[in-house]
Amino acid sequence: MCGIVGYVGRQKASAILIEGLKRLEYRGYDSAGVAVLQDNRIEVAKKTGRVEALVKEAAKHRFTGTTGISHTRWATHGGVTDANAHPHVSSDGQIALVHNGVIENYVALKKNLLSKGYTFASETDTEVLCNLIAYHFAKEPVSDGQSRFMESVRKALRLVEGTYGIAVICVASPGEIVAARKGSPLILGVGDQEFILASDVSALVSRTQNVVYLKDGECVHVSAKEFSISTLDEEDVSPVVDRVTWNIDQAELGDHPHFMEKEIFEQPAALENSMRGRFAEDGSTAKFGGLNLGPVEFRQIDRFVFLGCGTAWHSCLVAEHLIERFARMPVEVDYASEFRYRNPPISGNPLFFVFSQSGETIDTLGALREAKRKGYQVLAINNTVGSTIAREADGGIYQHVGPEIGVASTKAFTSQLLIGAMLALHIARMRDMSFADGVEYVNALKGAPDLVRRALAQAPKIKEIALRYAHHTDFLFLGRLSLFPIALEGALKLKEISYIHAEGYPAAEMKHGPIALISEKCPTVFFAPTGEIFNKLVSSIQEIKARNGKTIVITTEGAELPPGLADELITIPACHEAVLPIVATIPVQLLSYYIACARGCDVDKPRNLAKSVTVE
């Protein structure tokens, strides 16, 4: 969740570090700090609040060094205070450390270090690791600085239980950084006589597009001229240098006030990128080069298991509906965080899919590893090339939507919906879907970007509705079939960015409890597209109106609602069942966004949330 940036090179480190932190602020923003090696000491500036607060604090220091580390924090151990902010410096002043993750056995380690005379200025588990490295550095026989520094980090990490992505500097090793990872992402940017360490590509892509994705259990030693990678067991690793395929312009705001708005309006292009080159020449099915499964192998699968967390879990639910509807194959959907611990019975020949925009979600990664441990094949749908999940899965599908900076997912979500719909088609055509039905389905998917553009054209009207309802503190979101997960997603978006209590339910379940909440003070957002259950949806809306509930109805063109049934009416284009969840998502994204803006909320950095959940 937190953000790490480290720099070794020829330029002043502090400005480069702070620039990187600004790009990572969506990963953690309780506090921020930098530590720079200079004049045979470690100079530190850190401050609670946004990175701008750190900028003011850093101006009080004379940073001149060319080696440093920095961090934006999302609090786990200890409150939001200056003392708990990273970087942490060992009590002997020799080691500074930034850390993402959780050291689970820090209490026992801290007790031992206290007995050896080390002191602590914070409540964090990170400071314990910092002092542990310092302890081993002090014990290590005097040799060349590099091997002594690296070995002290290795020895400390061998004693650690938990997860970490760390970057470490040492007074006795100027011009060097040692970094390591286990469970938390860490990337090395390879520049021209400079190297940048970061927990996210967006922090380094302005300086280089050549990167090395560190793997769990790997350590890297970096100087201004070279780097080397090895394992905790001192085995050398041959680095693989990849190239980032997007540039920094794609991570800039442009003319938009927030990244979330920018990314909502990028969705037509994002959908086009997700489907580009993924349809058969005859136009009757979807094709994926990375699944590593042929038609014969797919026909041997007897069911699918989809795993995800949060918004990705909602994508799984929609994919479940479409695969069962069109491919007639059973699908199970589970929270990745629950699957890895509840040990469900698994029989037959299932195929697992994990959904994760970042490819680093720790619960989803744990579920992937659990499924593979039991001998099952696991494929991944994610947006981040080189991510841990992408590397560890047996195959998968990249979303190709570019960087998503806003904490509340928008374009990555609709891209996952699209890929789920394409996957349903891919499977259905291998089973019993006809050529003609396949062509109709493909044409519907190809038309999705234009339908989304038409839905986005409703933005001014939706903004007006948002202004009328922004003062409410409770909302219900109701939908049926493939739009029930979109109701869940709409409620989640409103909760995430506006801090309004909201619940999503299947519309028919309203009578089984939630109807007790209906009142003038609790508006209902209701999905009521035309179709075979349209009349049942109308009846449910009438039940809300009979109890003086306010209704915001999202329906499709051509729907004939009784007069006065909708207090607010949002109309989206009528479309194929496979595309409907994508198009229906747009109004609730816009509604949540405009309500949050009206309430003065920090849309891109909602409180208590971070973009990528890399701690349990």
Image (tube, rainbow, N blue to C red):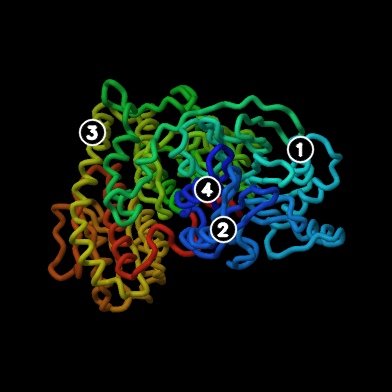
> Answer yes or no: do the residues labelled 2 and 1 have beta carbons within 8 Å?
no
Q: Could you say whether the residue bearing mark 3 is in a helix, strand or loop?
A: helix
Sequence-earlier tag: 4 or 1: 4
Relative to the observer, which residue lies in front, 362 or 58? Answer: 58
> Nearest the camera: 297 or 228?
228
Q: Residues within 10 Å of mark 3 (few under 14, many from 20)?
A: some
* Mark in the foreground, 3 or 1: 1
Image location of residue 169, percent across then percent down: 67, 46
> Quick one: label 2 or label 3, which is nearer the N terminus?
2
Three-letter code, disc 2: His
**Which is more N-terminal, label 1 or label 2?**
2
Which residue is under mark 4?
17
The residue tagged 1 is 145
Foreground label between 4 and 3: 4
Local crowd at mark 4 within 10 Å, few (<14), some, or many (≥20)? many
Quote the CA–CA distance across marks 4 and 1: 24 Å
Q: CA distance from mark 2 to mark 1?
A: 27 Å
